[in-house]
Amino acid sequence: MEWEWFAAPDYWLSRLVLQRGLAAVYLVAFVSAALQFRALFGERGLTPAPDFLRRVPFRDSPGLFHLRYSDRLFASAAWLGTALSAAVLLGAADRVPLAVSMAMWALLWVLYLSIVNVGQTWYAFGWESLLLEAGFLVVFLGNADVAPPLLTLVLLRWLLFRVEFGAGLIKWRGDPCWRRLTCLEYHHETQPMPGPLSWFFHRLPRPLHRVEAAANHVTQLVIPFLLFLPQPVAGAAGLAVVVTQLWLVASGNFAWLNWLTVVLAFSAIDGSAVVDAPAHGPTPLWFGAAVIAATALVSVLSYRPARNLLSRRQRMNASFDRLHLVNTYGAFGSVTRVRHEVVIEGTDEERITDATRWREYGFRGKPGDVRRLPRQYAPYHLRLDWLMWFAALSPSYAAPWFTRLLHRLLENDPDTLRLLRSNPFPGAPPVHVRALLYRYRFTTWRELRSTGAWWDRELIGPYGPPVSRRPSDADTSTDSTDADSTDADTP
C-alpha cells in the first residue's frame, strides 16, 4: 500500500527510541511483578488473588488468570514477560516479519493486562494504565519493515496530551497552592517516596519553588497543544516535555511514570534532523487496515476521557474501559502539607511494659531511619512502600491488608521480609509487633551539619494496638488472618 499520507518515514529514529524505551519499561514492570507478587497478592499474600478472582467476574477484570491461578503460573507469566521484553529491547521485534513483531507486542500487552487486573490495590496507579495504553498503541507502530504510520504517531501524541494536560488541569482545579505557586514549598518533602536529591530540592529558595510551579503550569497546560503543530514546533514541545520529566526524575521516585512520559515525547520529535531515514518496504494492506481500525477504536473510546478533561468534576487516573485502552491521567491535585509515616516495630519480650525494647523494621524506599538518605529506586516500583504512604494518610485505605502485614511479620514470612530493607529479628520472629505514627520533616542545613540526619521525626502516637503472636499463629491460614483484620483499622 502506497498512501503518501499514511507513512511518516522521517520518524523512524523516534520509533526506534520509543519502542526500545517502552520495552525497557515493560522489563522493569515484569521484574517488579515477579519479585513482589507472592507477598502482596499471591496465594498467601496480603490480598490474595484467588479470593479476588472468586469475587470478580472476567468481564469486570479480564485476564488470563481467570482461566486458572496459581503462584507458579503467575511467576511463569511474569518471567515470560521479562524475557520477551528483554528480547524486544535488544531488537528482536525488528528482526522478524511484521506480523510476528505485532504478535510479540500484543503478547506483552496481554500478559501485563492480566497482571494489572489481578493486582488489586497494589496496581491501582495511573502508570499501570499508562503502560497498557502505550503498549496497545505500539502494537500498531510497525517495525523496521515498514515506515512508521502517521496515525499511530498521532494517537501516541494524543496519549501524551492527556497525560500532561490532565495533570495540569487537576492541579489548577485542585489545591489552591498550585494557583498561588506555593505547592512546591511542601511537595518535595511530603511526596510519597522522596529521592536522594529531594532534600536539596526542598531547600531551594522560595522564589525558585514559584518558578518550578509556574514552569509546571506552562509545560502541562500550554505545551501539550503544540504537540499537534507542524515541525519544528511539535519537536520543540516534545523536548520541553523531556526536560520537565527529567527534572521530576531528579526530584523524586515515581516508578516509571516520568520515564514512560519521556518515551512518549519522542512521538513528536522528528529524527530526520539527526540522520536520514533508511529505505522501508511498502505498507501491507492488512497492516494499514489494522492501523485504521485501531485509530477508529481509540477515537470512539476517547469520548469519555475527553469529556472528563472538560468536566469540573475531573477524575484523576481513571480507566473508562476494562482493557485500559484509553484512560484519563493526573497527579497531585492536592498536596499534603505535613508528612506522616507509619513505623512498624517488634519486640521479642513476652510481656509489654514501659521498659520494653522495641526494634524497628526498615523499608527500602520510604523514610525510616532519620540518618538514611532517601534512595533512588524509580523506575522500579516499590509497591508496599508506596501504599505505606497512603496508609499514613488514611488507615481505612490500608485496613484490608495492614493487619495481615503485621501477622506476616510475626511469622517472619520470607516473602514479606524480602520486600523490606532490614529485619530486626533474623533468628526468631518477634512476639509482638506494633505500628506508630510519626511526623517527619526534612532537617535544615544547620541540623544536617550538626546531627548528620536528613529527617527529623516526632511521635504522634500509636497507629493501632499491638498484635501478638499466639502458638497457633505459625500455621495461620488466610481465613484465620482475616478474622484478626480489624486490630489495626483505626489509629
Image (tube, rainbow, N blue to C red):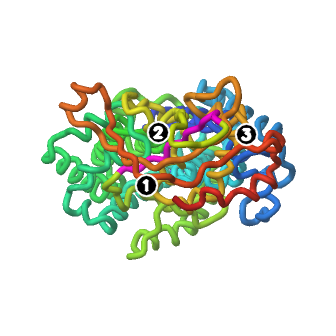
Whole-percent x, y for residue 445 in the image: 20, 32
Relative to residue 203, is residue 319 drawn left or right? Answer: right
Indicate the secondary structure of the residue bearing disc 1.
helix
**Discs 1/3, front:** 3
Q: Earlier in the sequence, mark 1 or mark 3?
A: 3
Q: Write down the quadrant of residue 32 in the picture.
A: top right
- Give the answer, above or below, for where 36 lies relative to 166: above
Task: Please report the residue visible at 69 percent of the width from the left and 57 percent of the height from the top.
Answer: 485
Relative side of 210 to 234, left or right: left
Q: Is residue 50 above or below residue 473?
A: below
Type of amino acid under label 1: Val
Q: Which residue is mark 3?
A: 38
Tag on residue 163? 1
Q: Give the label on residue 366, or none.
A: 2
Give the dominant element type of the magenta stretch: helix, strand or loop: strand
Residue 202 is left or right of residue 238, and the answer is left
